[in-house]
Amino acid sequence: MLFEQTNLLLPMIKNTLLNAVEEGGKVLQQFFNGSFTIESKSSLNDLVTEADHASEKAIFKVIQDAFPTHFILSEETGEIKQESNIKWIIDPIDGTINFANGIPICCVSIGVEENGKMILGAVYNPMMNELFVAERGKGATLNGKKIQVSTKDNLLSSCLVTGFPYQYLDAANGPLQIFDKLIRKAIPVRRLGSAAIDLCWTAAGRFDGFYEHKLQAWDSAAGFLMVEEAGGKVTDLGGNPYSPYQPGIIATNGKIHDQLLAVIKGGNL
């Protein structure tokens, strides 16, 4: 019954999602390259800005006006718990360091989860005028046009993207060890500074694969659905089915997935 009700509400939920990322995006445009307060959170370079809070407030208003009883999980506020089978997972600015430094690789990212399964995602970078949208079972789009992952099948000829945690993980097969293995084989590995954009650009075929060791749910909730709906594959670092509530992720075009997974699990190229 709940599933049937959600199906009936899905067009309204999707419309609310698009309105929410648009309103958050307006805030990013308003503050971008302007003056705003900046504070540190868990470490010196784990930042939150005045714009993060303003974007979150604008997003909350859109969602709560339409669905006041829905569960919300957001980076800055945390959980707003409700007895609902729908959860909105929000990053008001993904790529805050980029944003704070006037680098236009940053975005609003919102995923919508039903009973623990991601059903919708939207990632909006207003500075580049790129809106990525995914709906489970219906594909992924960039500015309304369908996108697909790349077709490369050799890791050695792939272009990858990754990120590094604010607090370095000193463990076997950690971020620097994997990075070292890849670049010693001359595999180009980029670091953009926004996991949501990394995932969307993988979905769009700009990158062949993305991996990262430590993310939060709001970093990947919308983006991982984007990759899956564009025909790609997403797992955790062990090759298991992916959940945004655990830290590690590998997202690829599917064709290089096992090769990249083998390297991340300790193998050599």
Image (cartoon, rainbow, N blue to C red):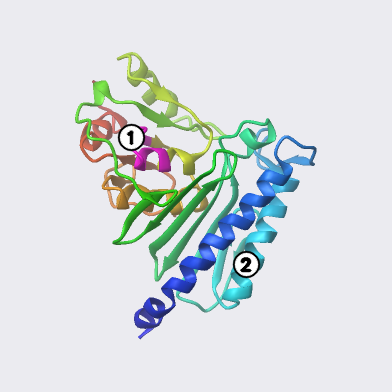
In this figure, which residue is indicated by the disc labeled 1? 209
Left or right, 141 with reference to 73: left
Q: Amino acid at mark 1?
A: Gly
Left or right, 27 with reference to 72: right
Q: Marks 2 and 1, Cα distance to the nearest angstrom?
A: 33 Å
Is 252 placed above or below 54 here? above
**Quadrant of the image containing the N terminus:** bottom left
User: SS class of the residue under badge 1?
Assistant: strand
Q: Quadrant of residue 61?
A: bottom right
Is 248 placed above or below 152 here? below
Residue 70 percent location from the top left of the image: 54, 74
In this figure, which residue is indicated by the disc labeled 2? 62
Residue 95 percent location from the top left of the image: 58, 39
Q: Is residue 268 visible?
A: no
Q: Nearer the viewer, residue 167 or 217?
A: 217
Q: Amino acid at mark 2?
A: Val
Q: Which residues are magenta?
A: 200-210
Q: Is residue 148 visible?
A: yes
Is 140 placed above or below 7 here? above
| Total residue callouts | 2
Label disc, if present, on residue 121 of the rendered structure: none
User: SS class of the residue under badge 2?
Assistant: helix
Q: At 44% across and 46% down in the image, what residue appears?
A: 247
Does the segment drawn in magenta span residue 5?
A: no
Residue furthest bottom in the image: 1
Left or right, 248 with reference to 94: left
- Which callout, 2 or 1, points at the residue further toward the start of the chain? 2
Does the segment drawn in magenta span residue 202?
A: yes
Q: At 31% across and 46% down in the image, what residue appears?
A: 234
Residue 163 percent location from the top left of the image: 48, 32
